[in-house]
């Protein structure tokens, strides 16, 4: 499927030779895809915020791409609502969605401490979270969250991993904190340089970043712990003051799209179909309100 050209675009395409094209450093990127409003729903244009977080969402040339982005586009196109996709550093996207009506955010983890801060539309993609160190760090052993406190942990300010660890009794003094659209790449480089010991990340993102630096992820990274409580998937959420009619339109569109072959094909193209199938198998045998 081809996507419409953006009606507005603002990029700073400064890049360094060592970075993949997917890690160009846009200070911000605003890409608008405007459509006629459905005659049944009258609303201001919706702003949908995201961050540089490949392979789920990232700036690519003059567009925003990634597995989550492609799903969001398909879902929103089916609603008939006017919307724009906007990519900023995570803290800015997060704050904008908290403060502004008719705003949505993806790909966001659904944590207990965030539950009342947003209206939750639904899960976009499955995800697995791990804590990584270098293969060469043979002396690092993590059997529990408490063990992680012995080491230097690389985090991104206000992201899901940091929020989760803080809710489990960690202090910011345990973290080597970064912010900005290239924070995840910088943390990977700091891990390789020995400046941090542990790097909690979604598996798909960690491997993507390693490959962007022409590294073999399995030769460089060693999984020392699984963050099972975070491995629930990434969601689409909205500002709490977004009208319910708008929210239900988007939610119904997402539910319907996830029943299509197009959705499975998008996951397959990004290597995520096995996680989705495992989730379906896991929940098919039990009664649960959880979604895949």
Image (spheres, grey):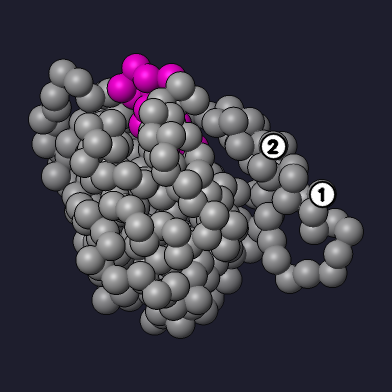
The verdict on residue 205 being magenta is yes
Of callouts 1 and 2, the N-terminal one: 2
Q: Is residue 185 left or right of residue 253?
A: left
Q: Which mark is residue 21?
A: none
Q: Decide which of 235, 283 is in the foreground and name it.
A: 283
Disc 1/disc 2 C-alpha distance (Å) = 10 Å
CB under 8 Å between discs 1 and 2 = no
* 93 relative to 59, above or below: below
Q: Residue at x 26, y 59 (%)?
A: 175
Residue 281 image label: 1
**Label 1 residue SS:** helix
Horizontal side of residue 226 vs 66, given as left or right: right
In the image, 159 versus 99, the foreground residue is 159
Image spot of residue 275 (x, y percent): 66, 42
Total of numbered circles in the picture? 2
Position of residue 21 in the picture relative to residue 219 (left or right): left
Residue 138 appears at what percent x and percent y? 43, 34
Q: Is residue 290 above or below residue 60?
A: below
**What is the span of residues highlighted in magenta in the rendered image?**
204-216
Q: Residues within 10 Å of mark 1 (few under 14, many from 20)?
A: few
Above or below residue 285? Residue 65 is above
Residue 168 visible in image: yes
Q: Position of residue 236 (x, y in %)?
A: 49, 60
Q: Is residue 225 left or right of residue 21?
A: right
Task: Give SS at disc 2.
Answer: helix
Which residue in the structure is indicated by mark 2?
Answer: 274
Q: Residue at x 35, y 70 (%)?
A: 170
The quadrant in which the C terminus is found is: bottom right
């Amino acid at each position: 499927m081809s996507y419409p050209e953006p009606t507005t675009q603002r990029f700073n395409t400064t890049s360094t030779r060592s970075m993949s094209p997917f890690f160009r450093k846009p200070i911000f990127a605003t890409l608008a895809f405007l459509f006629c409003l459905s005659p049944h729903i009258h609303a201001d244009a919706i702003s949908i915020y995201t961050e540089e977080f490949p392979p789920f969402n990232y700036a690519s040339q003059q567009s925003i791409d990634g597995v989550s982005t492609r799903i969001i586009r398909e879902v929103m196109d089916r609603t008939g609502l006017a919307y724009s996709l906007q990519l900023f550093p995570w803290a800015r996207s997060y704050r904008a969605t908290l403060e502004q009506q008719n705003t949505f955010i993806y790909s966001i983890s659904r944590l207990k401490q965030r539950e009342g801060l947003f209206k939750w539309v639904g899960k976009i993609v499955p995800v697995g979270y791990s804590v990584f160190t270098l293969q060469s760090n043979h002396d690092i052993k993590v059997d529990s969250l408490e063990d992680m406190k012995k080491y230097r942990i690389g985090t991104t300010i206000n992201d899901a991993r940091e929020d989760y660890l803080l809710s489990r009794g960690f202090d910011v003094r345990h973290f080597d904190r970064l912010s900005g659209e290239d924070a995840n790449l910088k943390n990977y480089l700091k891990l390789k340089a020995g400046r941090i010991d542990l790097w909690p990340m979604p598996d798909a993102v960690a491997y993507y970043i390693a490959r962007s630096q022409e590294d073999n992820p399995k030769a460089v990274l060693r999984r020392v712990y699984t963050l099972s409580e975070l491995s629930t998937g990434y969601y689409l959420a909205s500002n709490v003051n977004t009208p319910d009619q708008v929210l239900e339109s988007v939610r119904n569109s997402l539910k319907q799209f996830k029943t299509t072959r197009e959705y499975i094909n998008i996951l397959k193209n990004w290597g995520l179909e096995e996680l989705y199938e495992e989730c379906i198998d896991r929940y098919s045998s039990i009664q649960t309100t959880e979604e895949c």
